[in-house]
Amino acid sequence: MSTRIRESRGQEMVLTAAVAIVIVLLSLLPMLRLIKEIVAPGGTLSTVAIKAGLASPATWIATWHTLVVGIGGTLLAVLSGTLVAVLVTLTDIRARSAMVLCYVMPLMIAPQVTALAWLQLFGPASPFLKLFGAAPPLGTRNPLYSTSGIILLLGVQYGPLVFLLVRAGLRKLPRELIEAARAGGAGWFTMLVTIVLPLMTPSIMAAAALAFVSCVGNFGIPAFLGIPANYLVLPTLIYQKLAGGGPAVLGETAFLSVLIGIIAMAGILAQEIMSRRRDYRISSTSLAAEPYELGRWRPAVQAGMWLLIIVVLFLPLFGLVLTSLVPGYGIALTAKTATFDNYRFVLFEHDAASRAFFNSFWLSIAAAFFAVLVAVPIGYLIAWGKQRWVRLLNLSVELPYALPGVVLAIASLLMFLRPIPLTGIQLYNTVWIILYAYLARFLVLALRPTISGYHQIDRALEEAAQVAGAGLFTRMRTIIFPLVAPAAIAGGLLIFMTALSELTVSALLWSSGSETIGVVMFSFEQGGDSNYAAAMSVITVAVTFVLMLVTNLLAPYLPTGVLPWRD
Amino acid sequence: MARLSLDNVTKSFANFDAVKDVSIDVADGEFLAVLGPSGCGKTTLLRLVAGFEKVTSGEIRIGSEVVSGKGGSVAPEKRRVGIVFQNYALWPHMTVAENIGYSLKVAKLDKAVARRKVEDALALVNLQGLGERRPANLSGGQRQRVALARCLVAAPSLVLFDEPLANLDVHLRASMEDEFASFHKRTGTTIVYITHDQAEAMALADRIAVMDGGRLAQLATPRELYHEPANEMVASFISQGILLPADVLSAEQAGHCKVRVLGTELIVRCRPGERPRAGAKICCRSADLDVSPDGPGFDGLVKRVIYQGGSARIEFTPSTSPDITLHFEQPDPVMLESGSRARLRIRSGWLIPAVGAAS
Ligand SMILES: Nc1ncnc2c1ncn2[C@@H]1O[C@H](COP(=O)(O)OP(=O)(O)OP(=O)(O)O)[C@@H](O)[C@H]1O
Ligand SMILES: [Mg+2]
């Protein structure tokens, strides 16, 4: 190799190596560490951990519960998401963008906030029901503390996820496939059942798998709704074990977290098999179909849609705001009793709460910042790289996000329980372990938009710079980063919004001094201080709204589909 | 089998007229081709007839029934029209037989009867035995035949084709053309056939509607379209007609009149009632041009000689008007070279009617 060749290969090798290190550290290492704990705890092969886990009846009950709420929530999400997608995409319903925005909104709200909001709406202390004097007497059990309550909220939370995927599929459906059926004598509804829905099988299946993984891994909803009813699913079982037993039970929880991982993977596998059974490949592209005219049904369908949106979005948020203004449990809200004391308390007076705001903000900012920085080179290698093995990269970055958050949390605990070898740095019981988990888990949220950003850029722009004599790093800095920056930054903002009120990971990793917003909210709710929890929730939801508005400013420079709430 | 009539049909998208004031009468059993450059509104016209788009103004009748008009629009599934799309639009999740039998199933036809009809339709398009295949496992030509069978199985009164052969290779096109022609002869179905291939339109159609920018430019038989184009657009669009400025010198007599073109006088065909006028245009075909080294004619420069095997296409500019280019073919042995001078004669032509003259 001549020196000139070596020089030009050098920068690329450095880049590739750096990316490889980041990915090994953030996604491969934790997974391997977790697997090692199961098959070879303490360094020798043994089945003790597995046997102990399998022998415990609690494991089986929680697994059963996980499956029940997972499948129930998925079914509800698929039914509602698909129905809304069909109505919004294929009919001449009005105010489409507003509908999409409102319907997708619950996806941007943390599950525990959703849970809290709904609990506030229906409980005996509900300030909303009290407005009409319809609240059940104090002491009555909240109807949401039940299996069906959990299923309902999972369906509400993840219906929008299904909606987004099915809508994307419907938009790609060439209009001729629909029109050929109509010309063949099929009415709109017949056409829907015999042509559209079967052709949407791959989208619906993929959406179902995603919803299933999300439902199974969800912590916030079963924690708020299930723990009071002593209805434990695997994530909440892990939480309770760890909260009670500390590091001693880590091996046991490792087994449980792998169990969740296996259930989630089984869901994805089932989807693969179902989608392969028939040929659904649509080869042609064309315009989207003309919207079906609902005619005299239109007002009714629109009213139904808005009613749904009011029930799943506005009422719960309204209930949340009301609760945050009430001075104490069970007190009715009137002009006289309304107060901002709860806000003052969580922001300035309560130590852990104000610390949590500080922690969550800087954790989210750090995670977002790091992810944007790393997503640009990784995206470059994945989208434009010539090596085949790079595609494996993509898979390994997806893994920590695809698997339930509990899995990653346990893996992080295992990795950092002891000081890092050679350096002696201790991450366990500090805020840094949470940062590590956030980085690993959310990286993909910035990577996905960045990759689609790359696909939209004409590569000749980079090549022109190359011909002009710019090395790889110079090109990265001066050409590539400015071009993909909007997509990467939008991804960063999505990370910020997600991480800000994150609970699943931090619930297992927090320690005194490193509380996050989600954790403090959870402990307020568990201690019966719903008003404080509600005040914190309202603040995070408000921050999320504002950030969504800010992110919207980037919309003109973004590939479509990056901002889920934009139609 | 049914008549189709369009009365002053206009279709606007936002404030852009994709189809403007089009009136066409298609007789029962007629094969009408719609021809025009890309984006001229052919597909839109077809979708209006099928009922996938609503007319902005005007009226469409199939048989004696008004299907689109002021009073509303009959749903596509109630129109009994068959349609064959350029991209076939076969449903990938169904077998060939299921695709073809779809409309029968929707109509809740008896299963045994439906099966027999599907068999017949398969036989009609020479695809016996392929009923259980998936569309993905068929060749392009086979897919197009399945699409045809699917539209025919319900015995529609009117069949619409939207560039059905555009995705096929040249050889397959020729054989499918034959099949369409024989199918039309056998069934006598009314057909509206969209294409941008003139040869295809000429070979198949009883009449051709030429569209331009959303308007109907001319509706006539293929022969008339070629020999007597109604306007400049049709003249230059069909078979690359050559347009030349002319002054009409004499009034029409027995379908001919005298004109002056490029400084020479000649007799061209024309519409009845033409009178002397200036600033007219004639259309001539390359076959109407001759090299005449010392006869009457006009001089000019050979700009380019493109050898095409057996003959050459010559591009020629007359010395008197260098901005005009004429082209014609010269069989082997080709004597002209680019840059050389030559003398040309126009043997005959067609006087394009004045704008606004009734057609
Ligand atoms: N749904 C629509 N909305 C807006 N404009 C449209 C729509 N459909 C067609 N057009 C416009 O109407 C014009 C005519 O389109 P049409 O598809 O009928 O052309 P065409 O003659 O079939 O062209 P081609 O030969 O390329 O298929 C085009 O300029 C097209 O952009
Ligand atoms: Mg077209």
Image (cartoon, rainbow, N blue to C red):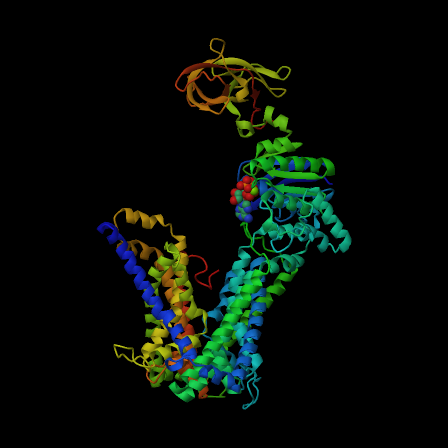
Q: Residue furthest left?
A: A3
- Residue A407: tell me if it is visible: yes
Asked where in the image residue B276 lies, by quadrant, the reply is: top right
Asked where in the image residue A556 lies, by quadrant, the reply is: bottom left
Asked where in the image residue A472 lies, by quadrant, the reply is: bottom left
Figure check: A341 above or below B180? below
Q: Quadrant of ligand 2?
A: top right
> Residue A54: x, y in percent?
51, 83
> Residue A283: x, y in percent?
55, 51
> Residue A411: x, y in percent?
39, 76
Q: How many marks?
A: 0
Figure check: B5 above or below B90? above
Which of B180 and B355 lies nearest the eye of the viewer?
A: B180
Which of B309 and A222 lies nearest the eye of the viewer?
A: B309
Residue at screen point 58% across, 56% down = A279
> Residue A192: x, y in percent?
63, 59
Which of B106 and A333 lies nearest the eye of the viewer?
A: B106
Figure check: B99 above or below A241? above
A457 relative position to B27: left or right: left
Q: Residue furthest top?
A: B294
- Residue B282: tell me if it is visible: no
Figure check: A524 above or below A8? below
Q: Residue furthest bottom?
A: A139
Residue at screen point 63% across, 65% down = A300
